[in-house]
Amino acid sequence: MEIDYLENIDGHEQNIVRLYNFNKTEAILFRDLLIDTVIIKKQKLNLAEVDFITPRNCNLIFGLFKTDEGILTKDNQTFFCVLTLEGFTNMIKLIEPFCKKESRGFQYLYDIDNPIDLLFCPSASFDE
């Protein structure tokens, strides 16, 4: 699994942080890590510290917040995905299909009016 940041992907100031290039096994590992660290232990999950995730041009840290804000950044290198417990629970549901079978589809992991989306994409591209 890899992570990167893509700026202005559609000419309309739409940016994405992309978790990509993974298989069913890594999707399960990622889902279980989110559940254990963020939902159960209520701790931050820093993807730079996860051995099966390779950061390309950025890092992503997940953490609980009082409101669903999505991804925030100050420098376009370190990103914080801050959601409520309900927001993370919904994210787990969106990841679940990738844990059941290999897929070439993709999924945005939240629906918040925010200039940066979070894309979960097993293949390297999301325009298939």
Image: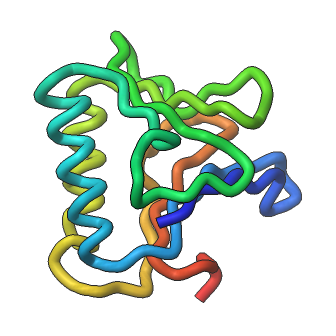
Residue at 28 percent of width and 21 percent of height: 43
Picture colour scheme: rainbow
Judge from the rendering whether residue 69 lies leftward or rightward of residue 109; answer left or right. right
Residue lying at the far left of the rendered structure: 40
Q: How far from the left and from the top, in percent, is residue 57?
A: 74, 50
- Tell me the quadrant of the picture where the C terminus can be found: bottom right
Residue lying at the far right of the rendered structure: 11
Residue at 61 percent of width and 34 percent of height: 114
Judge from the rendering whether residue 99 lies leftward or rightward of residue 4; answer left or right. left
Q: How far from the left and from the top, in percent, is residue 123?
A: 52, 81
Q: Is residue 53 shown above or below 83?
A: below
In the rendered picture of this protein, how many numbered marks are placed on residues?
0
Where residue 63 sits, quadrant-wise, is top left
Residue lying at the far top of the rendered structure: 66
Q: How far from the left and from the top, in percent, is residue 113?
A: 57, 35
Residue at 40 percent of width and 60 percent of height: 52
Judge from the rendering whether residue 67 lies leftward or rightward of residue 39; answer left or right. right
Where residue 29 sits, quadrant-wise, is bottom left
Residue at 21 percent of width and 20 percent of height: 42
Q: How far from the left and from the top, in percent, is residue 91?
A: 29, 47
Judge from the rendering whether residue 75 lies leftward or rightward of residue 114; answer left or right. right
